[in-house]
Amino acid sequence: RSKTVGFIGLGQMGYGMANNLATKSIDPLLVYDVNQDAVQKFIETHPNARAASSPGDIAEQAATVITMLPESSHVESVYKAMRDAVDKDSILVDSSTIDADVSRRVAADIMSKNATAFDAPVSGGTLGANAGTLTFMVGAPSLESFEKVKPVLCHMGHNVVYCGCNGSGQVAKLCNNMLLGISMIGVSEAMLLGTRLGMDAHLLASILNTSTGRCWSSDTYNPHPGVIPTAPSGKDYKGGFSNKLMAKDLRIAMKAAKDASADPVLGTVAAQIYNQLSVTKDFDSLDFSSVYKVYFKNKID
Ligand code: NAD
């Protein structure tokens, strides 16, 4: 088995992550996506990358395979397709955000074939994926195995954190994203109120960002257009992290909360709001900061 690294899922996040791998790692890269255009674009601009014909093809050739797919069902089907090709020298790392139970199940199945599986969901958004500054939350079979996988993740992230056994990376991630959904709605409400009361959006954001209301949704990903030109709000909410995916994460969080007999009041409201956005035509694929525009009925000046 060669030192080749495989990457499956060249979407909003995966493209930037694979780009960092291709640029910083000396190991050859093999990529796959059902979207042939993304694969074509990637290999045309990365001489050390080749296209694989299927997930099974990647699993046969690569020592380490990273997946960055939308939802649990995609991870289940891709892992099923890789199953027959893995062996004791295979390392599979799933960076998608999925249900922790599904994550544990697919990992156990892969490990029954003597391969090693990790959940390593990320935080930092497309800006972090492109810059190689993501935080990885890693669930691993052991601390020793975590130390082995860490170097490849360091090419894509600044913080690579061992969270405990398989599935615990997903637990950390669902807590983070429940808070993120709530904070984006909160920042949207504050920005809307301030601008409705006549305050300049840039000034208000700069005050929030040096005051106690400061958070990632306000200082890095502010939903008011133009406050952070590089954020999706500065590009008509295109790209970034879709309402559909945020709704998925909040569904995962609500299911986990129910299983744990927790009762998150604000998390429940955020899940309802994002669920509505995820089924609103023309808005399902917009970035989740578009809650500012959509939920507040296009009231942006
Ligand atoms: P995306 O939809 O942009 O990308 C997913 C990619 O997977 C697409 O290119 C798609 O063609 C490909 N794909 C789908 N099914 C496939 C299959 N069976 N085989 C191969 N490729 C397949 O999604 P994204 O925004 O990149 O998010 C990916 C994951 O990362 C999600 O679980 C999301 O929740 C999580 N995440 C996203 C962000 C963000 O800001 N976008 C941040 C953190 C975590």
Image (cartoon, rainbow, N blue to C red):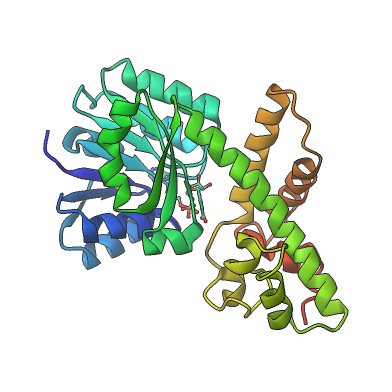
Answer with the quarter of the image where residue 203 lies: bottom right
Q: Quadrant of residue 114?
A: top left
Can you say whether 127 is above or below 113 in the image? Answer: below
Which quadrant is home to the N terminus?
A: top left
**Looking at the image, can residue 22 be seen?**
yes
Residue ranking furthest to the front:
211
- Say above or below: 212 vs 229: above
Q: Residue at x 36, y 23 (%)?
A: 141
Vertical placement of residue 163 versus 242, above or below: above
Q: Name the foreground residue: 17 vs 210.
A: 210
Q: Is 227 situated left or right of 61 in this image?
A: right
Which residue does the image show at 69% across and 22% down from the upper left?
Answer: 259
Q: Position of residue 30 (x, y in %)?
A: 22, 48
Relative vertical location of residue 186 with respect to residue 175 in this rendering, above or below: below
Q: Residue furthest left?
A: 2
Residue pictured at 71% horizontal, 70% vertical: 208
Extreme residue in the top direction: 112
Q: Position of residue 248 (x, y in %)?
A: 62, 43
Q: Nearer the viewer, residue 34 or 132?
A: 132
Give the total number of marks visible in the rendering: 0
Give the residue at x 74% y 77%: 204
Is residue 53 in view from this perspective? Answer: no
Q: Position of residue 214 (x, y in %)?
A: 67, 64
Relative to 270, 121 lies left or right: left
Q: Nearer the viewer, residue 150 or 286?
A: 150
Q: Position of residue 243 (x, y in %)?
A: 64, 55
Classify the position of the C terminus by image quarter. bottom right
Residue 177 located left or right of residue 207: left
